Image (cartoon, rainbow, N blue to C red):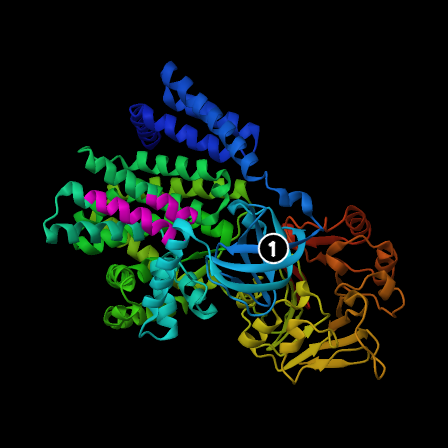
Amino acid sequence: MRWAARGRAAAGAALLSVRGHPRHVVLFSLAAGLALGPVSPAATVAAALAGAALAGRTGVALLAAGAALGGATLADARLAALDSGPLAAMTGERWEGTAVVLEPVRRRGARASARVRLRGLDDTAVVRLRGSASPGVGDVVAVAGFVAPLGKYDAFQRRRGAHVALEVDRFEPTGTGRGGVAGALDGVRRRAEDGLGRGLPHEEAALLRGMVLGQDEALTEEVETDFQRSGLAHLLAVSGQNVMLLALLVLAAGMVTGAGLRARLVTAIALIALYVPLAGGGPSIQRAGVMGCAGLVAALAGRPASRWYALGLAAVVTLALNPLASGEPGWQLSFAAVAGLLALAPRWREALRRARVPGPLADAAAVTAAATIATAPLMALHFEQVSLASLPANLAAAPAVAPVMWLGMVAIALAQVSPALCAPLNALNGPLLAYLEWVAHVAAQPSAASLPVRLGGPAGLALAYAATVAAIVLAGRVGRWLGARRAVAVACAVAAAVLVLAPRLDAPATPRPGELVVSFLDVGQGDATLLQHGGASLLVDTGPPGGPILDRLREAGVERLDALLITHAQADHEGMALDVIREHAPRLVLDGGAGWPTPVRRALPRTARPAYAGQALALGAIRLALLWPPRPPPGWRADGDPNARAVVALASVGSFDVLLPADAESDVTAGLELPRVEALKVAHHGSEDPGLPALLARTKPAFAAVEVGKGNTYGHPTAPTLAALRAAVPRVFRTDRDGTVRLRITAAGVRIES
């Protein structure tokens, strides 16, 4: 009862504090309207009512509600302007002309794309590239291709102003670049990129460009994975840390040269305004730039900066420019981190100092813990993992981060004179960059470094934040009861226990002795099925390019594959085959797409064998029989739909059979001799198949799984397919809804994990 009374008193005090800052309430109401306007009218009305309730006084309440509704109206108008380009009406038509490259080319497996501005139309599109073309930002290129809707892997570009994609069949550099202010900035950026690479090995140069300019395209997959699992990925995204360090560097240099306060602040604002587009101009750096400039303007005016007001102002400015920016994970994480720092870091810093933790260590620990906890639910939502190694890794990395940034920023300035001048600074930076890579690698190695966590969408996110707030409040109560030093000791003990127990929580889904594990893997709109028994592992298909198959295999505890079966030559099945082969070195690769001239086919190892009916494979207790397609006759050439020759396989361990038809539907399977099976991977992601009821009547599976991507544009799985499955199969699963589904089969029965 006493704690409940104290909780009500604390909530009342917090509400009074909010109502004591009416400008803040109105500003955040405007930001909420801008963010929620594109979502739904109901969300906008809820934001208006919440703003009015927080404001208290009638006049301020009306202003807050009006700001939320006005923000939604402004967002709708801004989106209408952004979506008014002519490309949206040209789907299916061919377009030829020149375009300006707006961002570095990004590659995922065999897929490459970049956002461009089409000249003549004054509209933005995503070009889907073939080959190894890698133009720089600002380059003018000749483009020809067909206009297509944005798909699964480039839909996020709509939030950046792109309306459609171009399936490019001609993409050639013109040798020219854009002009004006943007062209001048391109020149500054190119000299900076050149300077930051002088005298450094490739990996260190890529890391330095990532930390200073936010260009992570050249980082290897291994380095990116290490930084993600260790909780150091934020170092590769330019954000508030970069702006803060730049401002400190400029202010310190101004003091050394004897410049006045006004001159130092004006110079810092000017350099921040230059740095934001130089670092890519993304939502996170936009927010950081606005916040940094707002704080410096407040200092210039002789008034203490209101950090919360600066945060709200940054939200309003970035959302007014692009109301869809709030859908960017980077934007969300950036704001959550800053909010966590403002709300939690000061009191935690003081608690640590009272516990006699040294000042610099207390500062670093408080800041890292606050940012980590504030962003953990979002990390779980967007990336399905939370790093448990974040706090120790960030504490270990902290001494090197600021020197790397400062040396890099000075190098950018020197590069404008001559990139060669950067070599001495890069020589100083080299050992620091190598140290950061070492910290990330060591921290990422334990299985407990990154804990897989899945949230079910916005509702799950809200519950996660509610649980986080409750845990923080409870920890605060316990801390006051125990005292600062004891609370720190208990926190350290809990952290140690988590590190000991987390490997069990994060234990790979490897089979127990005598257990067969059949995993229908959630890889988006594509297929990937894993069978494990004893020490043997068989993977059937790898999902789409850029998909999470490597993460899924890591979660399953796979180190090396015994066999990889690629069922046919379509990207949603073979898209990550080369990545899987490079990472897990399968002893045998069976190629069901032999003959089709895809990029994956051309790059497969020479030891890959064509797959056709009649082949059988034994991997320990796992038996794999290929039922389709027939062996091609001499002189056969690939033609038509690869789905028609997709491999149909039957996998068995003991009396448990799994039918894996890939994308082969009843027009293929109706002519095959099929036994009764215990489990079925539904063909073609659950597309409509009139022969499915007959197939189910013949095979009588107890379990069926549809491997399908969330929000796919094909309407998979279709209503008739779901109806047929529900009528005939006791347990039906979908990876878009259930995530990865595992059947654990033992003599005692089948246990299901999802």
- Residue at (28% x, 53% y) in the render: 490
Would residue 288 be counted in the magenta stretch? yes
Question: Residue 694 appears in which quarter of the rendering?
Answer: bottom right
User: 702 or 182, which is in the foreground?
Assistant: 182
Q: Residue furthest left?
A: 258
Question: In the displayed structure, would residue 403 be above or below residue 558?
Answer: above
Residue 131's spot in the image, x, y percent?
59, 69
Q: Is residue 599 left or right of residue 26?
A: right
Name the main secondary structure of what is drawn in magenta.
Answer: helix
Residue 501 appears in view? yes
Q: Which residues are magenta?
A: 265-289
Amino acid identity at mark 1: Gly
Residue 468's spot in the image, x, y percent?
40, 43
Residue 273's spot in the image, x, y percent?
32, 46
- Counting the numbered discs, the total is 1
Q: Is residue 100 left or right of residue 189?
A: right
User: 421 or 580, which is in the foreground?
Assistant: 421
Would residue 282 be counted in the magenta stretch? yes
Please name the residue that numbered disc 1 is placed on. Answer: 97
User: 606 or 541, which is in the foreground?
Assistant: 606
User: 138 or 722, which is in the foreground?
Assistant: 138
Q: Quadrant of the C terminus?
A: bottom right
Q: Residue furthest right?
A: 671
Q: Is residue 479 left or right of residue 451?
A: left
Give the structural element (helix, strand or loop) at label 1. strand
Q: Quadrant of the N terminus?
A: top left
Q: Crowding at label 1, few (<14), some or many (≥20) Cα neighbours within 10 Å?
A: few
- Residue at (35% x, 67% y) in the render: 194
- Residue at (17% x, 55% y) in the render: 358
Residue 348 appears in view? no
Residue 733's spot in the image, x, y percent?
69, 54
Question: In the displayed structure, would residue 598 be above or below residue 743?
Answer: below
